[in-house]
Amino acid sequence: MRSMKTVALWLTLAIAQFLSVHQAAASVTALQTFFNEVSSLEAQFTQRVTDERGMLLEQSSGIFSLSRPGKFRWDYRAEDGASSARGTQIVADGEYLYMYDPELKQMSQRRLQDALGQVPSLLLVQSEADIEHHFVITELGLTDGLTWVALKPRDPDAGYQQLMIGFFEQQISQIVLLDGLGNETRLQLTGLRENLSLPAGRFSIKAPAGTDILFQ
C-alpha cells in the first residue's frame, strides 16, 4: 500500500514539474504547452507494477484529478479484487496533503508547506519550479505512436532510477517509473478531459468514523 501511494506521488511530480520546462526538444515543449494551457484535468488511470522479469506484482485503476494551483486527487479502486489499494485516496486541497488508507483505517495529514521538502510531488504548488533542477532530461523519440521523454532524478536518494513519459498530441498517455529494485510501474491515462469545471468538494476528504488521524 505504501509503495502504491509513493508511486502516485512520484507520478504527480512528473506531471506537475513540466509546468516550468524550458527545453527546445519538441516533445518537452509540447508537454509544457499542454500543461500551461490546462487549468484542470481528470482522467481514468490503470496501473501495473511488474518485477525485473516482467511478472505482474500489482494491478489497480482509478481516477486522477488535478486543479491548479496546488490541488490533486488520486482515487484507487480494485481490479477484480487483485489490488490491495481498494479505497486508497491521496488528496491535496491547496493547504494540506491527506493520505487515507482504508485497510489500516488511518489518514495522515500534513501541511503542504511543511511537506515540500519530503514529498516531491508537492512541487505542484510551486509556480516557478524548474525541472532541470530535479532531472536530467533525455528525449527518447517515437515508439508505438507516442513521443517519449526520460527523466533521471539528480537526487541520488530519490528512491527510483528513472521516469519515462509518453504523450500524443500534447496529451499525456503513459507514465513509466523504474524503481531501485528494477520493478516497473506503468500508468496509462485514458478519457482525459481538460479545463473542466470540477466540483468544489472534489479536493476535500472526510475520514470515516473510527479512522485514526495522524498529524505529521
Image (cartoon, rainbow, N blue to C red):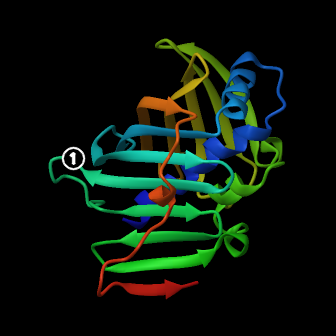
**SS at badge 1:** loop
Report crowding for label 1: few under 14, some 14 to 19, many 20 or more residues within 10 A (C-alpha). some
Q: Nearer the viewer, residue 71 or 82?
A: 71
The answer, for residue 7, to whether it is visible in the render is no
Name the spot of residue 156 as percent of width and height, x first: 71, 57
Name the spot of residue 23 as percent of width and height, x first: 82, 27
Q: Nearer the viewer, residue 117 or 38?
A: 38
| Residue farthest along the left direction in this orientation | 80
Q: Give amino acid for label 1.
A: Glu
- Picture layout, residue 192 above or below residue 116: above
- Picture layout, residue 2 above or below residue 17: below
- Picture layout, residue 34 above or below residue 109: above
Quadrant, the N terminus:
bottom left
The residue sitting at 42% across, 78% down in the picture is: 107
The residue sitting at 39% across, 39% down in the picture is: 45
Quadrant, the C terminus:
bottom right
The residue sitting at 74% across, 16% down in the picture is: 26
Answer with left or right where residue 39 lies relative to residue 91.
right
Name the residue that disc number 1 marks. Answer: 79
